[in-house]
Amino acid sequence: MATSAGGEMQADRVAIGQQLRRLRREQQWSLDRLAMEAGVSKAMLGQIERGESMPTVSTLWKVASAFRTPLSYFLGAATLPAVAPQPGWHQDASGMAVQPLFPFDPALGFEMFVIDLQPGALSESAPHSPGVVEDVVVVDGEMALFVDGEWQVLTAGDGRRFAADQPHAYRNDAERPARFHDLIHYPGAGG
């Protein structure tokens, strides 16, 4: 039997909430401590843990960075992407959809995502943990990348490496979706 999009969204909310609660308890952090470390309100964190609210990608990045854990910890393993978002994609109101292509590999210290930006999408990212580096490669379309205090336009085939422990953002000013790969390196995580 096919699962409805609403049912999948509810299952995603619950799974993310369970992962958040498990990690918070493993770290022995209160909701207050996590709110302070992540810069996300205690009320929002409670809603996420209870599966009442689907966090944005930006919020998940803040939480993952606070715990110094990869984003894919919250998104889980997924299959290769298709043209339109499929099960396994995490979509948010910013117009960004993210799917792990290669979930975090502790031996190599990286994870890789396929990210789609809808026309008009803007996703701002808080700084990740110290030393984290991202490699962005545009696969299809055109996007703007904000790094080092300025916007750079990237088109299919363009790539940039940047220090992700600084504020950065992704934007799609074009009239069609953009797709890019995002490889995230975590210092000291690899063997």
Image (spheres, rainbow, N blue to C red):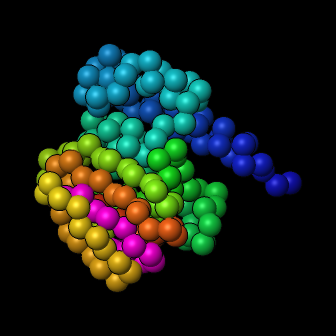
Name the residue nearer the viewer: 57 or 1.
57
Name the residue nearer the viewer: 172 or 29.
172
Q: Quadrant of residue 106?
A: bottom left
Residue furthest bottom in the image? 157
The residue sitting at 54% across, 36% down in the picture is 54
Question: In the drawing, does residue 90 fall left or right of residue 156?
Answer: right
The residue sitting at 32% across, 38% down in the picture is 62
Can residue 140 be found in the magenta stretch? yes
The dominant secondary structure in magenta is strand
Name the residue nearer the viewer: 151 or 53.
151
Residue 19 place in picture, x, y as percent: 48, 36
Specify whether residue 33 is in view. Answer: yes
Q: Quadrant of residue 153?
A: bottom left
Residue 173 place in picture, x, y as percent: 40, 63
Question: In the drawing, does residue 51 fall left or right of residue 8?
Answer: left
- Looking at the image, how many numbered discs can be counted on the residues? 0
The residue sitting at 32% across, 16% down in the picture is 32
Name the residue nearer the viewer: 189 or 185.
185
Specify whether residue 101 is in view. Answer: no
Residue 75 place in picture, x, y as percent: 49, 49
Q: Quadrant of the C terminus?
A: bottom left
Question: In the drawing, does residue 134 fall left or right of residue 98?
Answer: left
Q: Quadrant of residue 35?
A: top left
Q: Quadrant of the N terminus?
A: bottom right
Residue furthest right in the image? 1
Q: Read off the magenta span.
A: 137-147
The residue sitting at 46% across, 56% down in the picture is 120
Can residue 184 be found in the magenta stretch? no
